[in-house]
Amino acid sequence: MRAFVAVVEEGGLSAAARRLHISQPALSQTMHALERQLGVQLLVRRPTGVQATEAGRTLLAEARAVLARYDQAVAAVARHAAVGARVLRLGIPLELPSDLLSQPLADLAVAYPDTKVQARHMSTAAQLAALRADQLDVGLVREHPIGPDLDAVLVVEERLGVLLAADHAAKIAGPDGIRLDALAGLD
């Protein structure tokens, strides 16, 4: 839902992908999967961007309401944690499959039965802001945070590919490949 809202608000998949700090193909797949799940076309794709269909506009209003209510519910429940109980507020990338963490979270529940996990799907930028505002305890982010105020530990490495003209790739490639930040400003 958060990804769909971002696409409509940004008016395009590329801009929304940048806002969400995910790849455009991953976001496109997410939108196609949402349309398949709901059985309706939500977006009209044009060379100049996307526009919500009537069904998309209906979903946009409902999604905003659902997301606002979800955030309120999570905050309200967190205030009622039992004395001695712990709450781990966990940020998860938007494009991470929901079942990927089910076993690690189940293992955590067995190892620490007094700890409740509140997982929220958020973009990297939103997670970093929430960590700095003390609204998250742990964030699974796709990029190393800049600055000394957050500690970061690599938990998994994802190999990505990039297609560039050979002469441009030769200019920005380093010994370990092409850094993500070297792609800033490119279409």
Image (spheres, helix red, strand yellow):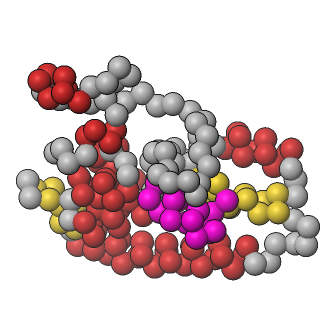
State the image quarter where residue 64 is shown.
bottom left
Residue range (magenta): 124-137
22 on left or right of 151: left
In front of the other: 88 or 145? 145
List x then y, in percent, for residue 31: 32, 53
Q: Residue 176, relative to residue 89: is it above or below?
A: above
- Residue at (82, 72) in percent of width and height: 81
Q: Residue 107, relative to residue 119: is it above or below?
A: above
- Residue at (58, 70) in percent of width and height: 133
In magenta segment, residue 158: no
State the image quarter where residue 153 is shown.
top right
119 on left or right of 184: right
Residue 41 visible: no
Q: Residue 149, relative to residue 79: is it above or below?
A: above
In front of the other: 60 or 22? 22
State the image quarter where residue 52 is shown.
bottom left
In front of the other: 148 or 88? 148
Q: Residue furthest toward the left?
A: 47
Secondary structure mainly formed by the magenta segment: helix
- Residue at (50, 77) in percent of width and height: 68
* Image quarter in which the N terminus is found: bottom left
Residue 158 visible: yes
72 on left or right of 174: right
List x then y, in percent, for residue 35: 32, 55
- Residue at (60, 36) in percent of width and height: 155
List x then y, in percent, for residue 4: 35, 62
* Image quarter in which the C terminus is found: top left
Total label count? 0
In magenta segment, residue 127: yes
41 on left or right of 153: left
List x then y, in percent, for residue 124: 46, 54
